[in-house]
Amino acid sequence: MTNETWGTVRQELLKSIGHSNYVNWIEPLEFARIDNGVVTFNVPTVFIGDWVSRNFGDRIISQMGKSGEPVNRIEFQVQNVASRPAPAARTDERRAPAPRAAPRPEADLPGAQLDTRFTFDTFVVGKSNELAHAAARRVAEGEVVTFNPLFLYGGVGLGKTHLMQAIAWELQARHPELRVLYLSAEQFMYRFVQALRDKQMMDFKQMFRSVDVLMVDDVQFISGKDSTQEEFFHTFNALVDQRKQIIISADRAPGEIEGLESRIVSRLQSGLVVDLHPTSYELRLGILQKKVEQYRPQFRGVEIGAGVLEFLAHRITTNVRVLEGALMRLFAFGSLVGREVDLQLTQECLIDILRQSDKRVTVEEIQRKVSDHYNIRLSDMLGPKRVRTFARPRQVAMYLCKHLTQRSLPEIGRRFGGRDHTTIMHGIRRIESLKDSDNQIAEDLELLRRSLQDQ
Ligand code: ADP
Ligand code: MG
């Protein structure tokens, strides 16, 4: 093959894989030779070779066939090709605008696939997530790096991943030149282990340190894995030093992640930490209304009856993902049975989900969880001792019993070693006032509530 044929092949590849993929992965290749049906390219790093072979290998082979150079395999040899060539003049001008102006932050970096539904347009804002949303919006402008890192946390299904991916889409749309990498902590770990195994740490480091925006989702999974933590920490520091934006999510606050080194905790806390609170009824209803709009084109003709959305928002309270699943099922069901999805049909169709979210938390579960949380014996929490180490957890447990169960105060009193209902009331009031002034108590309550309700 001549360099000229390679030129034609490249032109075709540019058309089929898009400009940014082309610049990142095809341009760095330097045609070396064809031998016995094997085409060899020089590449600057092993990583690029692997990536190209995994993602574009078949396409290159088939394109070469079409251009009159049949080959059946590609090989790469690492050579000091003048690192990465400067982006070519935009030869793909006529491609713009792209079919669905879909930015593809995932396309040119080994991150996770982004979900096209997770954009700011589809994110419903309410009191419980307005801070997180505002921070995400700000970061997505991609102008000055103000909050670094942005740390988002909250319970399962409250929209962390949605918000992070919305940032990625928005950044790519506004600043296509930025290298945005979104991946889960597990993927980070996996890549790291793989790089260690394949002795490609240099590539690994180089790749992670070359991004402009790094997003790591569900970072709680990194805890306890010492070497991964270490590497994460270095990557993190290197990027912060270069004033590159970092966005992290977790299911709890940095300080609550067990097994995370304290220097990492304090780095994570050094930017802006915002949490997504449990959803309110209004927000859930708003989300459902939005989803109905989204699903409607797919399920033409399906009618959702009066009161159904309100019913769902009322009954399915912990996890937006479950809420969405329920609605989706109703649409699917409605299109099958061909009649309006009214309240009765809703209850039949969702019987399992409704039963699950009806699961009542018991006083005993609360007592057990609370005593575990504070590391005290159950007998001490229920017993008569008044020292604060026992009294405070006791009051926390009383408070949670009041809010998470249907028990009356006298009933709660009986289960707390036969205490009087006025004692219970006093305990509850104490916590009510403390939770506004004492962050630790507020956090404890939140964590306990979540772990009791999400199980
Ligand atoms: P998390 O990452 O916090 O576990 P996700 O971001 O995966 O939660 O959200 C779960 C599902 O709920 C997703 O389908 C997401 O689109 C939806 N969701 C959560 N919060 C909102 C919101 N405020 N507006 C619209 N959809 C939401
Ligand atoms: Mg998530």
Image (cartoon, rainbow, N blue to C red):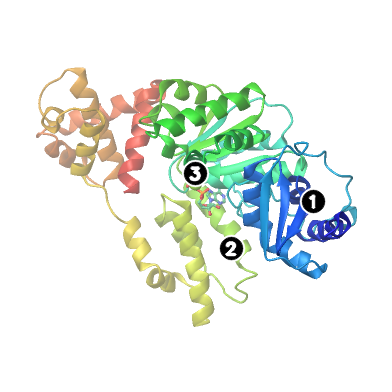
Q: Residues within 10 Å of mark 2 (few under 14, many from 20)?
A: some
Q: Position of residue 111 (x, y in %)?
A: 59, 46
Q: Which picture quadrant has residue 65?
A: bottom right
Q: How many labels does the image show?
A: 3
Residue 322 located left or right of residue 409? right
**Residue at the disc numbered 1:** 19
Q: Where is residue 129 in the image (x, y as percent from the top left)?
A: 54, 40
Q: How crowded is mark 3: few (under 14 residues within 10 Å), some or many (20 or more)?
A: some
Q: Which residue lies furthest to the front in this view?
A: 36
Lower position in the chain sequence, tag 2 or tag 3: 3
Report how far apart the C-alphas of labels 2 and 1 lie in the structure. Answer: 36 Å
**Near-viewer residue (364 or 175):** 175
**Residue at the disc numbered 3:** 194
**Near-viewer residue (86 or 309):** 86
Lower position in the chain sequence, tag 1 or tag 3: 1
Q: Is mark 2 on a helix, strand or loop?
A: helix
